[in-house]
Image: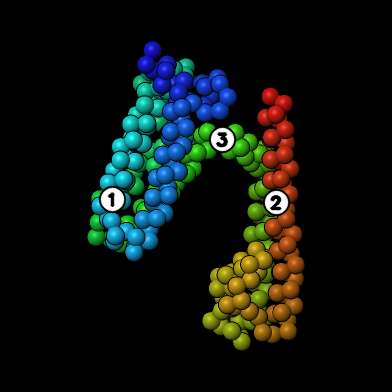
Amino acid sequence: MLRRALHRQLSPQAWREVGLSPVNKVVCALILLASLVAVVETEPTIRRLAPGIFRGMEVIFVMLFAVEYLARVYAAGEDPRYRGIGGRLRYLVTVWALIDLIAILPFFLGFLAQNNAFLLRIFRVLRLLRLSRLGRFSRAWSALAEALSARIHELLLSVGVAGLLLLFSSACLYAVEAADQPEAFGSVPRTLWWSIATLTTVGYGDVTPITALGKFFAGLTAVAGIGIIAMPTGILAAALSDAFQNKQEQ
């Protein structure tokens, strides 16, 4: 009975009423609050005012998420796919179970990096991955996954075209600009930074061609970048529209 009740409360698919179950609403609120605390804690002036409070709140969040994680593992047995020891092991390697585990791990990994400021910053940032857990409760995320799966070949083609264009534009700028700007265009790998900034239409301006031929190729690259950005955008827009339409029909 307890396992069935937990499964009904924790699994969005098992909740037959409109919206989320009360337990999942609390979980969503905790995820948002924990992420907000993780963001605020990165500000040194605020962290120095009350370092113990942030540490205590993180301990509370980790304890609550750990209890929730164990409850989900236990309740997974209500699903025929995850019954028994073998089923539980299969559940532990599912995408959402791994994301739940990642929400807890940075706290414990932080003990291994007490004297390493860089690793501590990395583990603080990893706590923001808890926000990805909200995808379990949203149909939009499942629609996005369905859209990506349905158009994976078209998206891979657009990525391949973008990669070829990046390489070609880098090679052209290397050929015409290397003699005048060896620091910025002295090799194809160095020129890739300029190509990425130009093709994505960001255009930082920290590296720019100065020769007439270089400016000509830069113009072609900039114009081509518009199409490169539009191609996967159009593919994803059409796929998402189809996925949401299918959800509504179902």
The amino acid type, in three-letter code, at marker 1 is: Ile
Q: In the rendered structure, which amino acid carries the disc numbered 2? A: Thr
The picture places residue 126, in percent across and down from the top left corner, at 40, 50
**Residue 125 horizontal side relative to residue 138, left or right:** left
Q: CA distance from mark 1 to mark 3?
A: 32 Å
Q: Is residue 198 visible?
A: yes
Q: Which is more N-terminal, label 3 or label 1?
A: 1
Instruction: Return the disc, 2 or 3, that comes first in the chain's sequence.
Output: 3
Placement of the N terminus among the 4 image quadrants: top left
Q: In this figure, which residue is indicated by the disc labeled 2?
A: 233
The residue lying at 55 percent from left, 73 percent from top is: 190
- The location of residue 104, given as percent across then percent down, is 35, 41
Residue corresponding to mark 1 = 53
Q: Which residue is mark 3?
A: 138
5 relative to 167, above or below: above
Give above or below for 58 relative to 194. above
Disc 3 residue crowd, few under 14, some 14–19, many 20+, Cα 10 Å: few
Please tell me which residue lies in front, 154 or 12: 12
- Residue type highlighted by circle 3: Ser
Which residue is painted at 60% across and 82% down in the image? Answer: 178
Foreground label between 1 and 2: 1
